[in-house]
Image: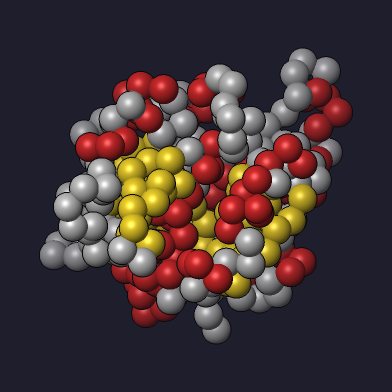
């Protein structure tokens, strides 16, 4: 069964301040459009990862102020994909946003990533999808070298000698302020089978019971890492494919957006476009 992509795009981009467009459409470099250089929205890099993996169906889950994303990508013809759009319902973080699409995907495998993060290598999703298809894991995470200054979740676990795929033994969301050591990495995207989709729906039922109490302090917002950590503790098998030379850049903050033009694969519109 071919995978379906779910893209959470309901955030407010508060770190970037006021923007003239949704942050998912912020231009980062250019792409070759029939011999002409066109500004390339940052989310297009993620969609290209999906296409390279063989994924041809995707859902953006939006908040109502972000219909410019739908106007830009339309039905997905320019990407060689079928793209649909859903409205965010519960504003409690990416797991709730992603779950909005679950009734539309059935038991299909799911790919998800963050549309404001650039990844290297450009076929990371393709490699992870192959690893999931060849193994027995419920979830395959894309794992990258990271440290405490990257403000990301922490993952660790043994990697068999000579291999890049192995089990995740520890996963701590960044919100838990994990203690980093030299053997820790982070995850930046996930691909999973139907058992995790069902687990996600059940886990959100549990979190909904905590909303009234949490809302008395501030509106709750749970990261996807929280659900992954819960699933790991409850016995679901989570593996990771590690990219030891991989790189990533979250462009959701001004200082990082300023560095995006130097990221591998970002074309400045001059000379020959990267493949």
Indicate the quadrant where residue 59 lies: bottom right
The reply, left or right, for residue 255 in relation to residue 69 is left
Q: Is residue 242 above or below residue 171?
A: below
Residue 91 location in percent, x, y?
75, 37
Q: Is residue 123 above or below residue 179?
A: below
- Quadrant including the N terminus: bottom right
Query: Can I make out residue 100 in this image?
Result: yes
Q: Nearer the viewer, residue 85 or 73?
A: 73
Residue 12 location in percent, x, y?
63, 30
Q: Nearer the viewer, residue 53 or 275?
A: 275
Residue 60 location in percent, x, y?
63, 55
* Residue drawn at the location 58% of the way across and 30% of the way down: 20
Considering every residue shown, the one lying at the far bottom of the view is 1
Considering every residue shown, the one lying at the far right of the view is 212
* Residue drawn at the location 17% of the way across and 52% of the way down: 271
Query: Can I make out residue 155 in this image?
Result: no
The reply, left or right, for residue 123 in relation to residue 103 is left
Q: Nearer the viewer, residue 107 or 117?
A: 117
* Residue drawn at the location 58% of the way across and 58% of the way down: 73
* Residue drawn at the location 21% of the way across and 48% of the way down: 270
Indicate the quadrant where residue 107 lies: bottom right
Indicate the quadrant where residue 145 lies: top left
Residue 38 location in percent, x, y?
39, 51
Considering every residue shown, the one lying at the far top of the view is 217
The reply, left or right, for residue 231 in relation to residue 239 is right
- Quadrant including the C terminus: bottom left
């Amino acid at each position: 069964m071919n995978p379906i992509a779910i893209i959470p795009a309901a955030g407010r981009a508060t770190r970037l301040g006021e923007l003239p467009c949704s942050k998912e459409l912020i231009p980062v470099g250019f792409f070759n459009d029939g011999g002409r250089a066109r500004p390339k929205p940052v989310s297009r890099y993620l969609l290209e990862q999906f296409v390279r993996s063989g994924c041809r169906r995707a859902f953006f889950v939006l908040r109502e102020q972000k219909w410019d994303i739908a106007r830009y990508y339309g039905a997905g013809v320019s990407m060689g994909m079928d793209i649909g759009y859903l409205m965010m319902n519960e504003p409690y973080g990416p797991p709730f946003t992603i779950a909005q699409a679950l009734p539309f995907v059935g038991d299909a495998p799911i790919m998800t990533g963050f549309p404001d993060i650039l990844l290297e290598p450009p076929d990371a999703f393709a490699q992870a999808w192959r690893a999931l298809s060849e193994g027995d894991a419920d979830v395959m995470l894309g794992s990258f070298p990271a440290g405490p200054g990257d403000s990301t979740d922490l993952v660790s676990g043994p990697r068999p000698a000579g291999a890049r795929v192995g089990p995740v033994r520890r996963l701590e969301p960044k919100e838990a302020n994990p203690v980093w050591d030299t053997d820790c990495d982070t995850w930046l995207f996930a691909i999973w089978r139907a058992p995790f989709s069902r687990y996600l729906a059940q886990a959100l039922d549990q979190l909904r019971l905590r909303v009234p109490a949490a809302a008395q302090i501030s509106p709750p917002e749970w990261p996807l890492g929280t659900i992954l950590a819960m699933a790991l503790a409850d016995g679901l098998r989570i593996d990771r494919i590690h990219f030891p030379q991989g790189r990533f850049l979250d462009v959701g903050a001004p200082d990082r957006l300023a560095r995006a033009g130097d990221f591998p694969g970002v074309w400045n519109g001059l000379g020959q476009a990267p493949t």
